[in-house]
Every structure is written in structure tokens, then in C-alpha cells.
Image (cartoon, helix red, strand yellow):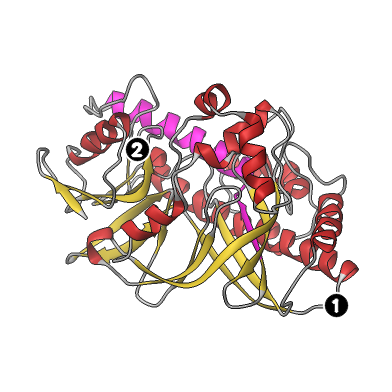
Amino acid sequence: MRVISTEKKPIKLWLDDIEDGALEQAKNLANLPFVHRHIALMPDSHQGKGMPIGGVIATTGVVIPNAVGVDIGCGMCACRTNLKKLTKNDTKLIMGKIRKRVPVGFDHHEQDMSWKGFHDAPDVPIVQQQLKSARKQLGTLGGGNHFIEIQKGDDGYVWVMIHSGSRNFGYQIARTYNNIAQKLCERWHSNIPKFKGDDGLAFLPIEIKEAKEYMEAMNFALDFAKANRFRMLEFIKESFIDVVRCTFGGTINIHHNYATWEHHFGRNVIVHRKGATSAKKGQSGIIPGSQGAKSYIVKGLGNPDSFNSCSHGAGRVLSRTQAKKQLNLNEEIAKLDALGVVHSIRNIDDLDEASGAYKDISVVMKNQADLVDIDVELRPLGVIKDNSKRRR
């Protein structure tokens, strides 16, 4: 960890390679009057909208929709099988069956999915408006950096890992309440900095109706995101059993875009984790690498300076546009083929999710040795991603 002390509040960083844009965003955060104690930047930090991805802030009395982001509840789940090995052919067969059961990209289920949470949805207009479409989105992967991965752990077992979020719920909730926050901040003449014209860091005082609605809607999106991952996991287990005889252990689940009440440095505060996960002492977590790279099952160390947090992955070094322009398709495919990974890189449009677009996960893990301990190191066997040209 290193500290920057040029702003009103310190910025604590677990990386040396922070880009200029992300650092400027962190400085904006450090000068907000309601930020508690300091800003924490995880080792995967890179520029986001309003706030760096891989950033953690604690606020007193306000919630900032853009400090959570548009994919509320995006997160990971992982499950160990009792398999000690899996052939490449069986991996391909399982992946084919998963693709038939789990829609990816913009595709949804043709029939409504059942979930008891639909009946308990809060009476918040934007949530109620999305319920109809959400019934077909439950158990779907989505696009972008979301993935399903079959892995082999250094514990000797085959694992399954999923990265996905709350689908359209998160986007619509974030957009709605960030717009409300912006209008209110303008009405109050609040001087909230924006970074190069992005959506900024407009806030909602926690005692007002709109903030309570946002928190209620956000928490529902977290529940939906978890249910979404668990429904996909059911489909994945069915796909495994179609091909090989196996059983499954318990599931680790975490999310990395959310805000929650916690107690830090003597105060009850709202901790915003945008592309960061909770790493309380002894808490199990998941830190994935890029496509073709290793991933990790970890235990949190409860470092107070990070607000008990750690990275949510490797973190980008190239934007999606830069990756498509700068990376060589044949070289990226060759790297994955050499590792024996059944992957999803097919054409130039897929380069935004190539390993060359991301940081070296081994460096990221080294930089957060005071945040987590590694329990299991996982190497990929097969990766499912959306490789259509339409992404959300």
C-alpha cells in the first residue's frame, strides 16, 4: 500500500500502475465533503464512470448511485466438483450442453423462470417495470466480461465459476437514480465534480425518500443477481451430469458492485464497492483472472485500511476499443491454444475480452498479499462468453 496525501482525504493504493484518468477520479472522490477517512484503490483499479473500477469509499449520510455502477450485484460464484480430472473432449461436450441451457449476450429464456423473489419485489416503480422481462432473464449470462468457466484447482479438483450480474435490473436502477441524484444536486447547487463529461458523483442524502428507494431497489437487484448465478449453476450441474458422473460441493457467492452499511474507524458508514469485494477476516472470496489466466479462491484478512476489501479481478489495461485496435487476434488465440483452453476468442470483436486487455493477475495478487490469503489456485479448462457482436 502507498498513500497520496495531496487532497483533502488520503488516497490509499494497492498498485503502482494506476492510469492518469483513474487517479484523477480518485482525487475527485478524496475532495468530497462526505467521504469518511480515506479512499481505497484495489490493485485492479482502472478508470470507470465517475469513480475508478476497483475503488472503495465510505460515506457519511449519503449514497452515490454512480459509486455502485450500472451492473448492481455483479459478482461471482464458484463450486467444486468431486472430479479429479476432465478430458478436453468431455469439457467440450459439457460446454455445448451449457450453451443450450444458458442464454448468453442479449438472449433470454423463451419461458418465464420461477423465483420466489419476484413475489417479494419492492414497490419501487423502476423495479416493478422490469419484472416482466426479468422473468425471462433469470438464469442468463449476459455479455461483456461475464463468463462461465470450468477450471482445475491445485487442490486436485475440477471447479465451476460464474461471473454475472443483475441483468437489466441493475442498469435501469442505476440510470434512474443517478438521474434523480443529478437533478437534486443541481437544485441544491452542490459542487460535485465530473470527470470529462461523464455522469459524475451525484449523491442522495440517506434520509430522503429517493435514497431509501434506491437502497431498497439496489438490495433487490443484489438478490436477483445471486439468484441468477445460482440458477445458471443448476443448469451447469445438469450439463455435467449429462456427460460425467459427479457430485458438487457448497457454493461460494460474492458480489462486487454494491453499497452497504458497515462500521469502520468508529463510525457507521455506507461502504461503496465498485469492482471490489468484501474481504472480512476469514471470509471466503473469489478473484478471477482474465480469459486463459488463473483464478483464485481466497480468504479475507480483514485489512481495515481497505475497508475490509480486495480486488474483484485482474482489471483492464486496455479499453474495449483499444484492445480491438492494438491486440493481434492470431497471437491472442495462439496463447490460449498453447494453454489447452477451450476459449471464446473467434474474431476481432472478441479481443476486448482477450487476456492482453487485462493486467497480469499474478501481479494483482502479489499487490494484495495483505488483503487476502490464497486457498486454491485455479487454471482454466474451458471458457464460455458471449461472442456475438451485440454486447451489453
Residue located beneath label 2 in the image? 51
Of residues 54 and 138, the one drawn nearer to the viewer in this rendering: 54
Between discs 2 and 1, the one toward the N terminus: 2
**What is the quadrant of residue 333 in the picture?**
top right
Q: Decide if residue 130 is on the left or right side of residue 369.
A: right
Closer to the camera: disc 2 or disc 1? 1
Residue flagged by tag 2: what amino acid is it? Met
Q: Residue at x 65, y 46 (%)?
A: 336
Where are the magenta residues, as a range?
160-187
Q: Which mark is residue 302?
A: none
Residue 339: image x %, image y %?
A: 65, 53
Residue 304 picture location, percent across and down:
24, 66
Q: Which quadrant of the structure image shows residue 299?
A: bottom left
Could you tell whether 327 is left or right of 362 in the image? right
- Mark 1 crowd level (few <14, some 14–19, many ≥20, 10 Å Cα): few
Whether 127 is among the magenta residues is no
Residue 307 or residue 148, whichever sits in front = 148
Please check the rendered image and state whether residue 172 is part of the magenta-colored stretch, yes or no. yes
Q: For the residue carrying disc 2, how many other residues have a C-alpha within 10 Å: few (<14), some (14-19), or many (20+)?
A: many
The residue positioned 21% from the left and 36% from the top of the image is 27
Residue at horizontal 21 percent and vertical 27 percent from the top: 191
Q: Is residue 285 visible?
A: yes
**Residue type marked 1:** Arg
Residue 362 is left or right of residue 325, and the answer is left
Q: Quadrant of the N terminus?
A: bottom left
> In the figure, 285 relative to 44: above or below?
below
- Which residue carries the number 1 mark? 245
Placement of 165 over or under 7, stated as above or below: below
Instruction: Give the Cα distance between marks 2 and 1.
Output: 46 Å
Q: Give the main secondary structure of the magenta stretch.
A: helix
Q: Could you tell me residue 392's position as x and y percent?
A: 63, 34
